[in-house]
Amino acid sequence: MLYNAPKKIQLTPSLAKWRIESEKSVLVFVGLDALKARYSNQKAANEQILFESFNRLFKKAKALDVPIIDLNNESITDGMMRLGEYLSQDDQLILAGEMNATFRQVIKHIASVSDQIAMVNDAICLDNQEQHIQWINTCVEMGLNHLNTASLIRLWSLSAPTEFILSAKGILLAIAEQLDIEPLELNPTENLKAYGLDSVAIVDLIGLWRANGANIRYEDFVGHVSLEKLMTILRPSF
């Protein structure tokens, strides 16, 4: 059974001074296949919380077009080459998943090249809670950042440029995120309520778009509201 995730008060606060931005971020999942094999059939609350964090990160990254690397043990070499490419572009590595001994050594090596690395501290897994706390403390000593899932998602959302949020792609991805479906599954003329769009999702979308300057109201969702209709409202000059 998975251990209880450490509480915030148990972790040394991050001293990193750089700001996480969605446009510069690369989300790296480590060892997800191994974690799924180990825990996916168990019903304990700890496992459910961990995989819910993975799911939230994955959905938000897709919605904001953040690159995602799935780094499994069998593809460690290819994965490290991709990480090197992103680091050479001064991108920010956001890490989640299984922090095994091998990968922890890799992180220590990468940290000698760049400090633009952040651990999602409630979406990583080690052998036990003590190791979890110790690893976060080690990351702080190396000058790396750490934060929880909710904080990361908030920073990504706040830093996403308006040009993307109100672009055709950004609108499509935001709707797909709320509906928990793949963007290509959306029929542009179909009523979004037929896909499960509810009042909570509508309020979230309105808040996102209005915060980025869009003139859209709750009344615009009355009756038949399709992706095509929303594009017309949000992008009237296109």
Image (cartoon, rainbow, N blue to C red):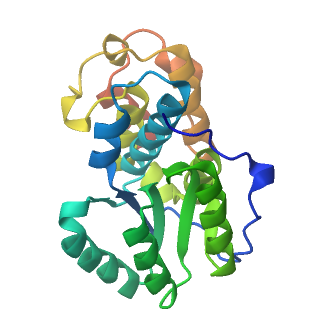
Q: Is residue 237 visible in this depiction of the protein?
A: no
The residue nearer to you, when weighing 118 against 137, is 137
Is 225 situated left or right of 132 in this image?
left
Is 39 situated left or right of 134 in this image?
left
Q: In which quarter of the image is residue 18?
A: bottom right
Is 187 situated left or right of 45 in this image?
left
How far from the left and from the top, in percent, is residue 102? Answer: 37, 71
How far from the left and from the top, in percent, is residue 150? Answer: 62, 44
Q: Is residue 1 visible in this depiction of the protein?
A: yes
Q: Which residue is drawn at 50% across and 61% down?
A: 22
How far from the left and from the top, in percent, is residue 151? Answer: 65, 50
Q: Quadrant of residue 72?
A: bottom left
Residue at the extreme right of the image, as rendered: 9
Is 46 situated left or right of 104 in this image?
right
The residue nearer to you, when weighing 179 against 138, is 138
Q: Quadrant of residue 130?
A: bottom right
How far from the left and from the top, in percent, is residue 7? Answer: 73, 45
Q: Residue at x 43, y 29 (%)?
A: 178
The residue nearer to you, when weighing 187 against 200, is 200
